[in-house]
Image (cartoon, rainbow, N blue to C red):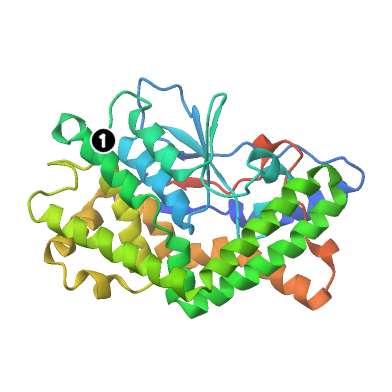
Amino acid sequence: MNSAGRVSFTARSFRRDAKLKALAMKRDSGNIPTTQSPAPLITDRSNPTFASARLIFYDFPLAYNPAKARIMLVEKGLPYTTVIVNILSSEGVSPAFIRLNPSASLPVLRDGGKLLTQSKEIVTYLDTVDGSPLGGKSVDRKQVSQWVDLTAPWDGNLFVQANVPAAAGALGLFGAFKKEAILSFKARNPQLRSVYDEKVQAMTQTEAKGSDPRAQEANRAELRSILSKAEATLSKQNFLAGSEYSAADALLSVILWRLDNLGQIDQYLSPRTFLSRYWGMIQARPSYNTVFGPSKNPFTAFSLAGPAVAQVLLQKVTGNRDQILPCGSDEASQLPSWGWEED
């Protein structure tokens, strides 16, 4: 890693497309090679209480919910391995990923034989897994828990659908494509038919909620309530649960990043002086660029979204579901990975 602490996207993502084509050519014969093990995301954040890369984190750097787990991993300095699952493409509903997590959602955290699939439970787990919760004795643990309960349920994806029409339209295209992918995968994997049917039903419900004006306004009202409570708290102390950064601040950081990424941060922070100061402190933390930098880098964002866009366009042009490639082997632990490495 260089002195600037820069995280770069490796060429592995570009080589990945060629590998997928090779997998597609061999899938009918059943001779699908084992994929390469994922590379460590962070290699210099050692912790003597952990075995190297004991934690395996399934992530997508552009997504809202995985950022909650990612910021905990980085702030705590836990060594881990990352596996990037492109939830915009057919990879996000591939048989391998469905077997790992039937809801086909991120984040997913594996710690030995333990598998966690909900962002809130992952945040709570990571905060205490090494016996040293963020903030230590400088924060009120009860307040941390209360803030986690308040902020974790807010739906940052619904906020996109309700407030950014262009992004909502793009997500709609990806969603329609993934439903086509599900039809293709379901035909090849009849044993997963019921799981895929449940996934389609969940996607349809999410789409309906995203276009419901009442749900949209409730989402905005929930956000305003969170930010107003944070403003009141931060008028008395530097962080949400005391004098040091805690898991409560990690989750609020992700909410503020979502607003910033959508160009709406000024609208919500301009009337909130203390929260504005706090946002400046969050951006100054070393974790900020590590966790959120990839989503703010146009090249990296295109590198992540590009393969999904190509799949959508190819399927629309050909109208052929056979163009939708299954990703990885039948073992969920062998999902293809895009590696993030520090240079």
Question: Would you place residue 199 above or below residue 207 in this image?
Answer: above
- Closer to the camera in the image, 141 or 167: 141
Q: Quadrant of the N terminus?
A: top left
Is residue 226 or residue 116 the one in the foreground? 226
Say which of 315 and 5 sits in front.
315
Q: Farthest right residue?
A: 29
SS class of the residue under badge 1?
Answer: loop
* Residue nearest the observer in this picture, 167 or 86: 167
Q: Where is residue 276 in the image (x, y as percent from the top left)?
A: 17, 64
Left/right placement of residue 65 relative to residue 141 reads right
Image height check: is 134 above or below 322? above
State whether residue 261 appears in this view: no
State the image quarter where residue 319 is shown: bottom right
Q: Position of residue 175 (x, y in %)?
A: 64, 66
Disc 1: CA contacts within 10 A as few (<14), some (14-19) or many (>=20): many
In which quarter of the view is residue 101 placed? Answer: top right
| Res 110 seen here | yes
Amino acid type assigned to the residue bearing label 1 in the image: Leu
Q: Residue at the spot x=38%, y=58% of the render?
A: 293
Spot occupied by residue 266 in the image (x, y as percentages of width and height)? 25, 74
| Residue at the spot 44% in from the left edge and 38% down from the top edge | 122
Q: Is residue 73 left or right of residue 105?
A: left
Q: Is residue 237 above or below residue 263?
A: above
The residue that disc 1 covers is 134
- Where is residue 324 drawn, in percent x and y? 78, 61
Q: Residue furthest front?
A: 214
138 left or right of 262 in image: left
Q: In this view, does 157 lie above or below 149?
A: below
